[in-house]
Amino acid sequence: MLISGLVIPQAYIRYMNSRDFRPPFEKGLTKNIRILDDLRGITSLDEFGGYMWVAYCSSSQADNKNLLLHKKMKQLRAKFPNETIKAAVFLVDVTIDETEKLTAYRTEHSDYLTDNDYVIAGNAEVLHKYLRNEFRFEGIPYEKDGVWNYDRDLIILDRLPEDKDGNRPVLAHMRGQLDFHSAIELDQEAMKNNAKYVPNEERVNQLLVDTIQYFIANPNEEDAPLSGE
């Protein structure tokens, strides 16, 4: 069965069956942004330079948290216990004046979040546009009928090496956008009629693992053309 382009972008599909797997360069993350993290106070995304990391959104609302991706990150770290994999968890409904919500969110998710995770708030208007324009999440987060709507994909970013002058021309390269939620929804429907069906979720899980494994094996990969090459 072909995997829906809504679950895995075409750039990933081009590489996923290759004998020499290489996660695609989606785009460069070029614009920095000031953020508020509950452990570090005011900081910015350039602090992630040199690390493997992922980015995803969540909400502080009781019924609107992105718990699935917290679980995926915990599983990923269990596979690579000796590697530092950071995560930027953007709380779309928390402002920079609500530091207590950041602290409460980390406490509530202490089984999943580590000191390598950033629980992030920002100026709402600036942050929401940044998520849409820079990370290319599907849409700007918005509230409707008291519920926050936001893209629940996981974005994988590489650890760019410094150039000969000790600089990084861009903050990171986006190396994949994975949609676990849609994969699970597709699986639930497909497995009703096909007992031998191979779940999309397993394939997306494997892509996440393969990507991190690639970063470990190629820590100093030089810059390359972005997708569309």
Image (cartoon, rainbow, N blue to C red):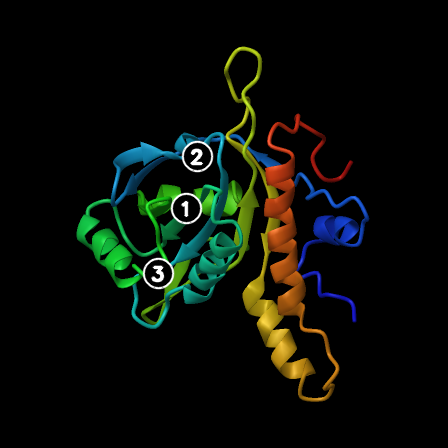
Q: How crowded is mark 3: few (under 14 residues within 10 Å), some or many (20 or more)?
A: many
- The residue that mark 2 highlights is 48
Q: Are marks 2 and 3 in contact (CB under 8 Å)?
A: no
Among numbered discs 3 and 1, the one appearing first in the sequence: 3
SS at mark 1 in the image: strand
Q: Quadrant of the N terminus?
A: bottom right
For the residue pair 143 and 14, the one nearer the viewer reads as: 14
Look at the picture and state if 220 lies above or below 163.
Answer: below
Q: Tell me how far mark 2 sits from mark 3, CA to CA.
A: 22 Å
**Residue 198 location, quadrant:** bottom right
Look at the picture and state if 103 lies above or below 96.
Answer: below
| Amino acid identity at mark 2 | Phe
Which dot marks residue 7? none
Q: Residue placed at 61% from the left, 27% from the top?
A: 220
Extreme residue in the bottom direction? 193
Answer with left or right where residue 124 lies relative to residue 214.
left
For the residue pair 153 and 130, the one nearer the viewer reads as: 153
Mark in the foreground, 2 or 3: 2
SS at mark 3 in the image: loop
Q: Are marks 1 and 2 in contact (CB under 8 Å)?
A: yes
Among numbered discs 2 and 3, the one appearing first in the sequence: 2
Look at the picture and state if 189 lies above or below 127.
Answer: below
Q: Tell me how far mark 1 sits from mark 2, CA to CA.
A: 9 Å
Which dot marks residue 88? 1
Q: Quadrant of the C terminus?
A: top right
Q: Residue placed at 65% from the left, 50% from the top?
A: 210
Which dot marks residue 59? 3
Look at the picture and state if 114 lies above or below 67.
Answer: above
SS at mark 2 in the image: helix
